[in-house]
Image: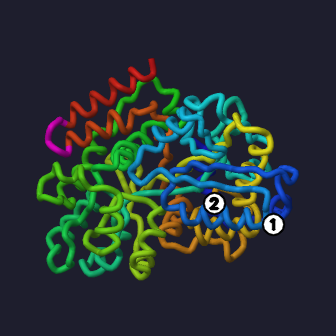
Amino acid sequence: MNKVKKLLALTCALTLTAGLFAACGSDNSSSSSGGKNVTVDIFQFKVEAKDALDKAAKTYTDKHKNVTINIQTVGGGQDYSAALKSKFASGQEPAIYNIGGPQELSDWKGKLEDLSSQPWVSQAYDGALDSAKVDGKVYGMPFDLEGYGFIYNKNIFKKAGIDPDTIKTFADLQKAVDTLNSKKSSLGIQSVFALPGKETWVTGMHTSNVALGNEFKDAVAAFNAKTVDFKYGDGFKKLLDIQIQNGYKPDGTNKSINSVDYSTEVEQLFSLGKVAIIQQGNWISGTVEGIDPDLAKNIGILPMTIDGTKDGTIPVGVPEYWAVNSNKDADTKKAAEDFLNWLYTSDEGKKMIIQDFKFIPPFKGYDASDLQPTDPLAKDILKYSKAGNTTPWVFSGYPTGWYDKLLAADIQKYIAGDLTWDKVISNAKNSWADARK
């Protein structure tokens, strides 16, 4: 889709005309909601952004004495969608929460404030708002732009004599993995990969998206699709198999891969140099830096390429959107909207978005030299985007519960040797069709 391509191209053009955010880029230290005391409860999923969000909230409330911001984070292996539903069902509805795109726009219809008049809307890159629109109205503010692929340790690759720039196809990746596997002892690694089989979002959402991002042009197309063909099902299998066969196995069996979680993968294995490659995205930068600052400067993103599609690509898109609860009173909604606007458009907030959140902003106006992404993963994503070597994120258009409760659950059975791949695909096709009836 042209809009998606424009989005990806524009994200890397962070050298736009100065002053694009002049109308909404200045710090605002005045009280919100006419000085009335307001409490804004935020219920969000992004564990990696928790500390930065806490800092931002404190900075904002120091200048807006009448506003109290409470933040609750549910993520890192927990089921955010289920937790959010429970939160609403309990009567403790948050003022700000997260939605993923077309499917969740439908799921939460009636509880989403129309944000079309917000000042940041006109500054969003082309395509960044597409998955948050219904009938031309905007119901979500994009978090950031993210990309994922095979994150690799440059020091290990150099020691193994592998040039990562030569890896474009799956065959190239297989060759590199074979080399790494043959040199595990001298490289000091336990395995080439660490696949977090316990994390349904990694396999059921992100790995599957590499295949389906080449089948559907965007998330809206996926949302509107009555069936899924899995045209690239064989390539999907290869991406999983290479991680399973060469992956970290706690007890030596494939089944034990299903006990590996995000923390084990990123913190205990990759960040400590015990594996060479993991399937993740630029959101891990802060975690790696906190464990090994030197390693954080020496990581990059390899392509996740499927045979029969464009070589050398990674998926790039908007991961989630900030939503404002339409059920809240006018003062609370105003304060919630003001905080989000301040965070992404004020001079102070923009610095936090880059330096603390380590986000790739989905908005124009970040042209200043101190507002450029600095971590190597963000730089790699911009490099892929500039070259047009990206595929869209379509998983926000998957049927509700399909990727985790159905597809990923079957993938876990496949990893354990309890289900054939043909059955994984046939079950996925049937469950998708059933959900769309």
What secondary structure is marked by label 2? loop
Q: CA distance from mark 2 to mark 1?
A: 18 Å
Q: Position of residue 427 (x, y in %)?
A: 28, 28
Q: Nearer the viewer, mark 2 or mark 1?
A: 1
The answer to whether 246 appears left or right of 278 in the picture is left
Q: Is residue 116 magenta?
A: no
Picture coordinates of residue 349, whole percent (x, y): 70, 65
Question: Residue 417 vs residue 236: left or right?
Answer: left
250 or 143: which is nearer to us?
250
**Residue located beneath label 1 in the image:** 27
Residue bearing mark 2: 361
Q: Is there any visible trace of residue 179 in the rendered image?
A: no
Give the percent coordinates (x, y) of residue 79: 42, 43
Q: Nearer the viewer, residue 303 or 378?
A: 378
Q: At 35% across and 58% down in the image, what residue appears?
A: 262
Of helix, strand and loop, which mostly describes the magenta segment? Answer: loop
**Magenta stretch containing residue 418, yes or no?**
yes
Which region of the structure is painted magenta?
415-420
Give the crowd class for mark 1: few <14, some 14-19, many >=20 residues within 10 Å: some
Q: Amino acid at mark 1?
A: Asp
Q: Earlier in the sequence, mark 2 or mark 1?
A: 1
Q: Quadrant of residue 168?
A: bottom left
